Image (tube, rainbow, N blue to C red):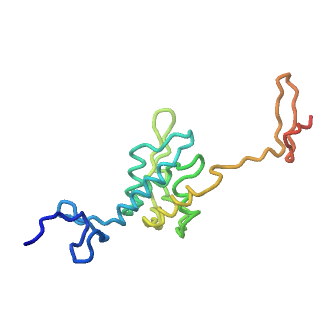
Amino acid sequence: MTSTKPTRRGDTGKPGNAGKFDRHARSEGDPIDFTAAARRIEIDRLLDGCRNALGDPLTAEGREAIAAYATNGGDSEAWTNISGKLLRRHRTLWQGVLAHSDYNVRQGPTTTAVDHGFPPFRPMVTEQTADWAAVPTADQVLEGLRGIQSEDKPGIEYSAAGAHITHLDGTVGFIPGDADSRGWEE
């Protein structure tokens, strides 16, 4: 007599293998790759920490476009759409991919003015004359996302060296480059 006990999803059903799972599972007849699902979960986790210049989270459309490219790769049009997205206050996806992966294309598409227009009535007309030399792979974009999230100090660090300030009484003060909390030179 055979057992009608249902097996767990992913169980191979071989003797001695009860409860152990394959890399693939079946859902409604189609195999699901667990590594692809784990990659998507990691991408979503990395995008949760991304904020634009105002500190707001990414839009749903931008988030989905980046996640789709980091999962499956894409063409030059898809890379053009996501490369300029701010992921930290002063860090774009393109800058993150350049800094944290082996992608090394430092010039984007080139546009040329076809008609310079005449203000205020006719706007300038441009056309794209050169495309990306190469677009990054999905793995390079994922490396860039990981690198951006691992940076300790996002954004640009400003130096107060040589800064002039105006006091409430109208006098002008000077903050030297080695200023600390003890006070400023007048």
Q: Residue furthest front?
A: 1
Q: Position of residue 183 (x, y in %)?
A: 88, 37
Q: Residue furthest left?
A: 1
Residue at image coords 39%, 52%: 65
Residue 174 vs residue 9: left or right? right
Task: Say which quarter of the image contains residue 139.
Answer: bottom left
Vertical arrangement, residue 138 with respect to residue 163, above or below: below
Image quadrant in which the N terminus is located:
bottom left
Residue 86 vs residue 128: left or right? right
Residue at image coords 12%, 68%: 3
Residue at image coords 26%, 77%: 16
Of the pair 8 and 110, the residue shown nearer to us: 8
Q: Residue furthest bottom?
A: 15
Of the pair 11 and 173, the residue shown nearer to us: 11
Q: Position of residue 125 (x, y in %)?
A: 45, 46
Vertical arrangement, residue 49 with respect to residue 42, above or below: above
Vertical arrangement, residue 16 with respect to residue 30, above or below: below
Q: Position of residue 50 (x, y in %)?
A: 51, 48
